[in-house]
Amino acid sequence: MFIITNRRVDDDPKVKGFKKIGDKPNPKGPNELRLVEAIKSSRGWKITILPDKVDDSMMQKASLTPNVAPDGTILPVYASQYAAAQVLGVANPRKKGVKGKNVLFFVHGFNNDFEAVLERMDGFAKTYGVEVIGFSWPANGGGIRGALSYKSDKRDARASIGALDRCLAIMYKYLNEYRKEFIDDKIKEICKKYPRNAERRDDLITKLSNQKCPFKITLVLHSMGNYLYKHLLKSSVYRGHHLLFDNVVLVAADTNNKEHAQWIDKIQCRNRTYITINENDSALGASRIKAGEEQLARLGHYPYKLNSQQAVYVDFTDAPRVKKSHAYFEGSAVKNKSNTAVKTFFHRAFNGELAETDVCYHASSNLYKFHKSK
């Protein structure tokens, strides 16, 4: 798995494992991004800090060819291109009989160290059959705990806005180049064949794109990761108005319910923007009792004033085995063999599909709601 991070990293080969990833922002600045490759085996995690520029062995592993400028100059190949090639190779394998995977891009929340982030990403991959990429920001309070840690993480989240924006822009760049590689010539042929029939032209281009690039990409934001994304959408630096994601899933959002539609309705996605709610969420209940604006109702546990024009609100409060969970996409709620409704929802949502079709809609509250098993 690949993780993009603006945490401090240690390139010293003598430093091993999770000691290579620090708690604080990169000393070159919070917008400085580094790529980490993590491989899990029976012995645990192997952590590799990728160099900025790819070496020959990495080029060969990812089947990359040198970048050449128009004047013939050989340009460097960066780690981001290496990671993109690896992920896209899994999402859309060119070997016959090999099935591709949808891609999940995960932004974690409050008080998460790097190991916890990796374990959760590994859980997504195993439970939902997706290829996972992570964005990890310094979110464990620099070693402090309690209210001070919470406030420290909120400051780090705001400081990480530029880093997340750069990350999304890079992802869009490589995805756009990948799609163009497959369909550019065909699009020219289609446009030439149907110069005056825009409906027929667009239909064929859409079908061609789905055939050549059949995978979907979903953004999953958990807890305070939603706070980071909110401030990115509201910031002047945001460049992410491209259609990068099929679904955007805001799980247990630790941000204010008040006026949330103002930023939620800026989200661009091809399919659905889901907001999940659990009124009994213990973590959001705890964050609400802290001083300051945190006393306001949190988006992820308040089933009122749900007035976004595009969001699909889903209430998990009464879903089997959710109880007080803050992460009901894992654990007992999705391991329930007698009632698979929660797991089915997240499997569909995380794979870029329509997920609310089997959930009861309450028009009076603009809310899809799971009910207790009888």
Image: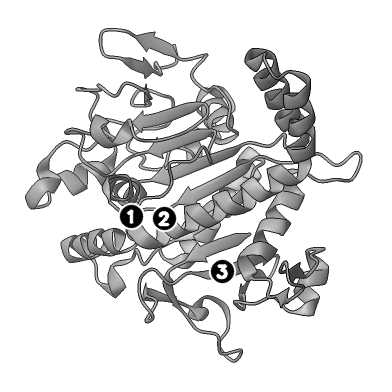
Amino acid type of the residue that numbered disc 1 sits on in the rendered structure: Val
For the residues labelled 2 and 1, say whether their Cβ atoms are less than 8 Å apart.
yes
Amino acid type of the residue that numbered disc 3 sits on in the rendered structure: Leu
Mark 3–mark 2 distance (CA, rounded to whole Å): 15 Å
Mark before the other along the chain sequence, 3 or 2: 3
**Residue 14 or residue 94, whichever sits in front:** 94
Q: Is residue 112 visible in this depiction of the protein? A: no
Q: Reply above or below: 2 against 368.
A: below
Q: Residue at x 47, y 42 (%)?
A: 220
Residue 35's tag is 3
Q: Residue at x 49, y 53 (%)?
A: 169
Mark before the other along the chain sequence, 2 or 1: 2
Q: Reply above or below: 87 against 70.
A: above
| Residue 214 horizontal/vertical position (percent) | 72, 34
Amino acid type of the residue that numbered disc 2 sits on in the rendered structure: Asp
User: Which class describes the residues within 10 Å of circle 3: few (<14), some (14-19), or many (20+)?
Assistant: many
